[in-house]
């Protein structure tokens, strides 16, 4: 040992580590190590991620939420780049993953949709604008020309609010009548029979 004083030796070690060439070297070794042990490292971190405590999950969730809020622009830019570089196959894989996620979480999503649907209906007065019925209510775009999208309770409120302002509540029979009128006035081009069919589907899904 070149130093008799252990404190001095410690100091020397610290200085040695802080030298730019050594910092660079350490970084390179790290990169090499990670690329050589990619599989085992990813397996380890995956296990660690899956075995988190509920408390840790909550912390991670809150952190993620905060991070996404603070880095909105960066994330959307990254995401655009991600999609731009993906060939069709990978895009399909992403879509499938999303589909699977929706399927796995169908029950939760259904509950959220039902709760939010009730809130949206209350916001519009809770009854049919024509006959006052309170059952089988649907969202109707008063002027179909102004329609940007169908009211899907799963969208966030920020997106829904301006669209909801263009809507009224109609019960199922009144909505059919209104759709027929819109068609006869040339406001909608789609055959009412097709529309009725898709509305039946929606009704079943409690959409
Ligand atoms: Zn009605």
Image (cartoon, grey):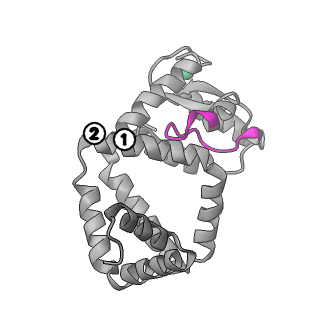
Residue 21, compared with residue 130, is above or below; it is: below
Judged from the image, the quadrant occupied by ligand 1 is top right
Residue depicted at x 51% and y 69%: 18
Question: What number of labels is visible?
Answer: 2
Q: Which residues are magenta?
A: 146-158
Drawn side of residue 206 relative to residue 41, left or right: right
Residue depicted at x 60% and y 57%: 75
Residue 101 location (% of width, % of height)? 36, 56
Drawn side of residue 182 relative to residue 21, left or right: right
Q: CA distance from mark 1 to mark 2?
A: 6 Å
Residue depicted at x 58% and y 33%: 157
Crowding around mark 2 (Cα neighbors within 10 Å: few <14, some 14 to 19, many 20+) is few
Where disc 2 sits, the SS reads: helix
Q: Is residue 200 visible?
A: no
Residue 49, compared with residue 83, is above or below; it is: above
Crowding around mark 1 (Cα neighbors within 10 Å: few <14, some 14 to 19, many 20+) is few
Drawn side of residue 107 relative to residue 200, left or right: left
Where disc 1 sits, the SS reads: helix
Residue 12 location (% of width, % of height)? 43, 69
Q: In the picture, which quadrant includes the N terminus?
A: bottom left
Name the residue beneath numbered marker 1.
59
Q: Are marks 1 and 2 in contact (CB under 8 Å)?
A: yes
Task: Give whichever of 153, 180 is nearer the camera.
Answer: 153
Task: Give whichever of 97, 185 is nearer the camera.
Answer: 97
Could you say which quadrant of the image residue 59 lies in?
top left
Label placed on residue 55: 2
Residue 160, compared with residue 171, is above or below; it is: below
Residue depicted at x 27% and y 77%: 40
Task: Give whichever of 207, 201 is nearer the camera.
Answer: 207
Residue 6 location (% of width, % of height)? 32, 64
Task: Give whichever of 97, 179 is nearer the camera.
Answer: 97
Q: Is residue 63 visible?
A: yes
């Amino acid at each position: 040992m070149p130093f008799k004083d252990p404190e001095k030796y410690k100091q020397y070690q610290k200085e040695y580590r802080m030298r730019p060439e050594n910092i660079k070297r350490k970084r390179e070794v790290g990169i090499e190590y990670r690329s050589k042990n990619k599989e085992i490292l990813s397996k380890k971190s995956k296990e660690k991620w899956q075995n988190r405590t509920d408390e840790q999950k909550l912390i991670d969730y809150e952190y993620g939420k905060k991070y996404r809020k603070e880095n909105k622009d960066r994330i959307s830019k990254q995401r655009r780049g991600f999609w731009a570089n993906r060939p069709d196959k990978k895009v399909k894989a992403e879509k499938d993953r999303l589909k699977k996620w929706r399927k796995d979480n169908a029950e939760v999503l259904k509950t959220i949709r039902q709760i939010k649907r009730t809130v949206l209906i209350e916001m519009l007065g809770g009854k049919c604008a024509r006959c006052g019925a309170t059952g089988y209510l649907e969202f109707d775009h008063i002027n179909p020309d102004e329609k940007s999208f169908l009211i899907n309770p799963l969208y966030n409120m920020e997106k829904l609010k301006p669209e909801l302002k263009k809507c009224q509540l109609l019960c199922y029979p009144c909505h059919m009548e209104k759709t027929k009128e819109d068609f006869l006035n040339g406001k909608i081009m789609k055959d009412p029979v097709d529309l009725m069919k898709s509305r039946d589907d929606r009704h079943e899904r409690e959409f």
